[in-house]
Image (cartoon, rainbow, N blue to C red):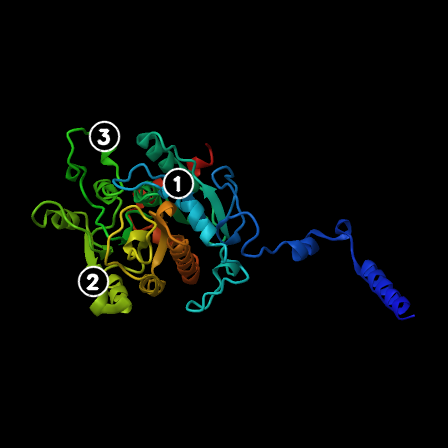
Amino acid sequence: MKYSNLAQCLLASSTSLAHNHVSDFEQSAEDLDKVWGQDWPFTGIQTFAHLNHQKCLLNRSLDFDIGIIGMPFDTAVTFRPGARFGPQAIRRASQRQTSLRGFNSRAGINPYQNWAKILDCGDVPVTPMDNKLALQMMTAAYENLMTRNSTSQSNELPPRFVTLGGDHSIILPVLRQLRKVYGPVSVIHFDSHLDTWAPSKYPSYWHSDESAFTHGSMLWLAHQEGLLAENTNVHAGLRTRLSGEGWDDYDEDDESGFHRIEADEILYLGADGMADKILALVPKDKPVYISVDIDVLDPSAAPGTGTAEVGGLLTRELIRILRRLENLSLVGGDVVEVSPAYDHADITALAAAQIAYELMTNMVKKGPLDVSIANTRNDAHFKDQTNFRAAADLI
């Protein structure tokens, strides 16, 4: 009798469940999304922070506000390669970021559930076999992306992008296209190296036009092309050795319009003091680009990079500095030089994923940019940009 009663209870329970179950065929798309649409950190296709993936280069009518774009290029390095695998590693390390667990307590917002439509735009398929062609491809890709419309900003301004490198040379094609929209921009460059070395600083009998383009010369090239705002650019975290027997590297860096903050200044300035020093040099009402070479961090915090230098910042110090820069008019940013082959337990990629999250948070916290920020040059140049965006619709 006891077993008969148990069987009856189980049968009644299963019948009740069957009656309450609704076939997937009877559920709406909204209902199905509630049931199956949310990933765990360890499930789903590896986009950045489980964001919706769109091939932004292929869809000219796509509207969004912030895009994650991978630039897997590393053949302009002068030491260890491997940063072409950086975008994959950073996306993998971002998997614990989700829209449901994205609230940034210091900013008081969840950047994934706010005004901005944020997409993972995939990668630019850059050739690894020809640097001249690769630079053309990256420049053309950003020119393409800069013709997209944002959903919440004026349609005269394109979406903003956080670029995942790739070696640091990828900043040159980015700055080329930003200039067309905003004019010369102020660059905050977190790095252990200057990256304003003229190509002649790399001694070799063998030279070519293509060999001038490296991950240590791209800011020198950017200055030569007029892409940088005058005297409002900052290096932070420097600890590089210099060329020759004197201060020639710093003299040339001065000519490129940069101020320098050494890494060991963190010892007496602290993170807030270093941020204050940056904010005193960079105008908050002009377009600003933040570029983060992961080797600005100490190798104990970021071993997975190609040109590590001892004596760097700690991850918490860099994050604190970035958080203090939230009121700047950020028109783009990047995190570069992540080489996962040299990483340990993904700690470098984890730091890079957090940096990308902080850059996005700053963009969202600041709010949509006003079109007036683009008109920082003369009217003729601004008219050129309007024509550029209009002509793109005809391509």
Instruction: Specify few, some or many for label 3: CA neighbours under 10 Å numbering under 14, 14-19, or 20 or more.
Output: few
Circle 1 is placed at which residue position? 72
Q: Residue furthest right?
A: 1
From the viewer's side, name the closer residue of 92 and 72: 92
Label 3 or label 1, whichever comes before in sequence order: 1
Circle 3 is placed at which residue position? 209
Residue located at (38% from left, 34% from top): 137
Provide residue 134's location: percent of width, then percent of height.
Answer: 35, 33
Q: Are marks 3 and 1 in contact (CB under 8 Å)?
A: no
Label 1 or label 2, whichever comes before in sequence order: 1
Provide residue 302's location: percent of width, then percent of height.
Answer: 33, 55
Report the mark closest to the observer, 3 or 2: 2
Circle 2 is placed at which residue position? 264
Q: From where the camera sits, is residue 158 visible?
A: no
Helix, strand or loop at mark 1: loop
Q: Amino acid at mark 2?
A: Asp
